[in-house]
Amino acid sequence: MAVFSRIAGTGSALPEKVLSNKDLEQFVETTDEWIASRTGIRQRHVVAEGETTADLAERAARAAMEAAGVTADQLDLIVLGTTTPDLIFPSTACLVQHRLGANGCAAFDVNAACSGFIYALSIADAYVRSGMARTVLVIGAETLTRMLDWSDRNTCVLFGDGAGAVVIKADAEAGILSTHLHADGGKKDLLYNPVGVSAGFKPEEKNAGVRVLMTGNEVFKHAVKALDSVVDETLAANGLDKTDLDWLIPHQANLRIIEATAKRLEMPMDRVIVTVHKHGNTSSGSVPLALDEAVRSGKVKRGQLLLLEAFGGGFTWGSALIRY
């Protein structure tokens, strides 16, 4: 008998500190109107001193596990999407695993930038379908404000910190119907962090420090095109029409990109989950954060058809079609 995976529970975590656009006006050459009109962002959450990606991931994981009625000893695998790990190694997934008391199960990180959660969910789904796992914890968690240049108004206004998680379980009925992943490393210089281990600093970025470098207009154009393509691919793979979708739960990077995807699907914005105005771009945390909010608010209900999608540095992009 075929085995599928379904989402059994969701959870999320946000730092206590909120940084509004008005707050940013005090130390960055920008305005609330400028940020909001171009991105839709009004505020973002920022980690406190000493607060880490693992802290947020653990909180989101515990909330998802409680919602799913799952204990740590039942986990077969933990996959954590992040581009801001606590350490280079061990993985943040291993740190979270130990905190949860799930020692012994497999645990690893996935770095696909803002597409990290979609990539992690796809891997978890494959493990369940293959029979290698029955209960998997999938997390997307970031502390991107730790790598921002707060003097660069083109990037520092965009990002926030946060984490979201889901528990998926093996089931006779399909919950995750399909996932679709893509990448194009040829566009790497349009959105990247110049610091690494093996390569060190790029020569032209000596002493630049850890920060986000982005060619915003080009990223916008590529994101809209890639997401249009993966939406079409997802619907075609499942023999569905765009009218069959109940909800679009997109990566929360920019309201204009979200609106462009909704327009492509001919979906009214009241069927699109939008959190970018209060979370900013939380990278791999954004989709599971939005999903958890939609579930806990009662908007998303069991049996509804959800389209999740994301686009990030790499470039990476992907989607997941889910019968919740």
Image (cartoon, rainbow, N blue to C red):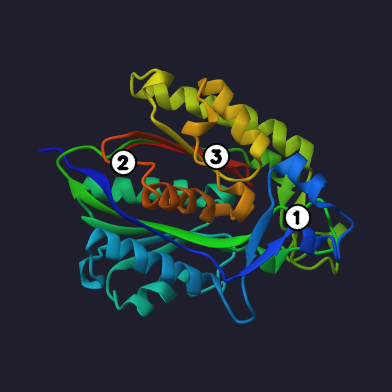
Q: Amino acid at mark 3?
A: Trp
**Residue 21 against residue 39 in the figure, above or below:** below
Quarter of the N terminus within the rendering: top left
Q: Residues within 10 Å of mark 2 (few under 14, many from 20)?
A: some
Q: Residues within 10 Å of mark 1 (few under 14, many from 20)?
A: many
**Residue 246 against residue 97 in the figure, above or below:** above
Comes first in the chain, label 1 or label 2? 1
Comes first in the chain, label 1 or label 3? 1
- Whole-percent x and y of residue 96? 41, 73
Q: Secondary structure at mark 1?
A: loop
- Whole-percent x and y of residue 271? 47, 32
Q: Residue at x 71, y 38 (%)?
A: 219
Closest to the camera, between mark 1 and mark 3, is 1
Q: Residue at x 44, y 52 (%)?
A: 293
Which residue is at the far right? 29
Q: Amino acid at mark 2?
A: Lys
Residue at the disc numbered 1: 157
Residue 39 in sight in this render: yes
Along the viewing direction, whichever of 89 and 260 lies nearer the viewer: 260
Residue at the disc numbered 2: 301
Mark 1 vs 3: CB contact within 8 A: no
Comes first in the chain, label 3 or label 2? 2
Quarter of the C terminus within the rendering: top left
Residue at the disc numbered 3: 317
Q: Residue at x 71, y 52 (%)?
A: 158
